[in-house]
């Protein structure tokens, strides 16, 4: 998805549990065809480990004849990670990739020195109408890998490992957690998991990483005197022993990892260097990025102010 360079408000409340560093509520953003909930970056927290961007797409009902149309746009210095609960997105990129993303799949696109991609609803779902619900995250690459060659990797749902723990069902989407390692190749230590918690569950958050957070997709979590419903992310303090509790059941996305250092972010560009971002802006404005085969006629202009 395309991010806009808008100022983000700081979180208005402070957590009462010492184990919590902060919590963040998703802010609505209109991307044209649907609303998304933007969690990262925020005024309260810019990153969790290497994760620098976190959008919850939908849930949204797209009527017949309409669909998602994120026109070709560029990225540098990051990897996009797309994961759907419902619906389908057709991914195309300047490497020539053409891939339908369906529920449970992981779509990992490494931008590195520069890539262009589009995300659209396919013709069949556009004709019939569809429902879209999913997450898109950006992972900032380590400084040594920011200019790596762009890559695209798609991992079908049945290739991702899962484990039952404390009554919860855990799918490890990227990185390593709870004794399982995802086949998704990453550039720095991180974890990303989809966890379904049954009613009355008490689930231990992994302590294997410096920075960790839990985002509520559905249901309700409780932590000390804090409550978290859909759209809220709990960010945990370094070294805290954390147990997630739910009375009614919940589905959560867990993310975290080791910090990669401060990053600048402008629109779809992430870099440790402001000059590199300025160069990317000039390159996109001048048409020096590659085009997307099969989707060459449209593009998203560089936002103002440039």
Image (cartoon, rainbow, N blue to C red):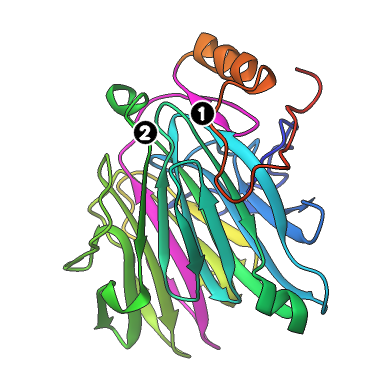
Q: Residue at x 68, y 78 (%)?
A: 125
- The residue wearing badge 1 is 270
- The residue wearing badge 2 is 141
Q: Is residue 44 visible?
A: yes
Mark 2 vs 1, N-terminal side: 2
- Image location of residue 158, percent across then percent down: 31, 79
Viewed as shown, does residue 77 lie left or right of 120? left
Nearer the observer, 273 or 259: 273
Rendered image quadrant of residue 218:
bottom right
Q: Which residues are magenta?
A: 243-272
- Image location of residue 135, percent across then percent down: 55, 61
In terms of secondary structure, where does tag 2 sit?
loop
Q: Is residue 26 visible?
A: no
Rendered image quadrant of residue 2:
top right
Nearer the observer, 275 or 208: 275
Viewed as shown, does residue 92 lie left or right of 35? left
Q: Residue at x 63, y 38 (%)?
A: 73
Determine whether 250 is above or below 204 in the image: below
- Which quadrant holds the C terminus? top right
Mark 2–mark 1 distance (CA, rounded to whole Å): 9 Å
114 in magenta: no
Mark number displayed over residue 52: none
Q: What crowding class fits label 1: few (fewer than 14 Cα within 10 Å), some (14-19), or many (20 or more)?
A: many
In terms of secondary structure, where does tag 1 sit?
strand
- Image location of residue 95, percent across then percent down: 43, 43
Viewed as shown, does residue 206 lie left or right of 77? left
- Image location of residue 131, percent across then percent down: 70, 78
């Amino acid at each position: 998805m395309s991010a806009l360079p808008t100022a983000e408000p700081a979180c208005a409340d402070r957590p009462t549990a010492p184990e919590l560093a902060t919590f963040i509520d998703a802010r609505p953003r209109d991307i044209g065809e649907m609303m998304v909930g933007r969690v990262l970056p925020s005024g309260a927290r810019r990153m969790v480990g290497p994760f620098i961007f976190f959008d919850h797409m939908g849930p949204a009902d797209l009527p017949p004849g309409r669909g998602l149309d994120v026109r070709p746009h560029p990225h540098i210095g990051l990897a996009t990670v797309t994961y759907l609960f419902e619906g389908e997105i057709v991914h195309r990129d300047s490497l020539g990739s053409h891939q339908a993303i369906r529920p449970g799949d992981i779509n990992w696109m490494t931008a590195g020195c520069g890539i262009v991609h589009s995300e659209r609803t396919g013709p069949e779902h556009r004709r019939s109408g569809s429902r879209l619900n999913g997450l898109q995250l950006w992972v900032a690459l380590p400084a040594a890998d920011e200019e790596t060659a762009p890559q695209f990797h798609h991992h079908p749902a049945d290739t991702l490992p899962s484990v039952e723990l404390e009554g919860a069902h855990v799918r490890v989407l990227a990185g390593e957690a709870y004794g399982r390692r995802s086949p998704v190749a990453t550039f720095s230590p991180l974890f990303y998991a989809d966890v379904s918690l049954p009613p009355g569950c008490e689930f231990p958050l992994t302590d294997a990483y410096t920075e960790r957070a839990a985002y509520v997709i559905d249901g309700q979590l409780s932590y000390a005197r804090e409550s978290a419903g859909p759209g809220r992310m709990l960010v945990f303090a370094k070294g805290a022993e954390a147990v997630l509790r739910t009375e009614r059941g919940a589905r959560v996305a867990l993310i975290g990892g080791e910090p990669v250092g401060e990053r600048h972010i402008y629109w779809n560009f992430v870099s440790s260097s402001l000059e590199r971002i300025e160069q990317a802006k000039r390159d996109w404005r001048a048409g020096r990025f590659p085009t997307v085969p099969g989707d060459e006629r449209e593009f998203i202009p560089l936002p103002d102010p440039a």
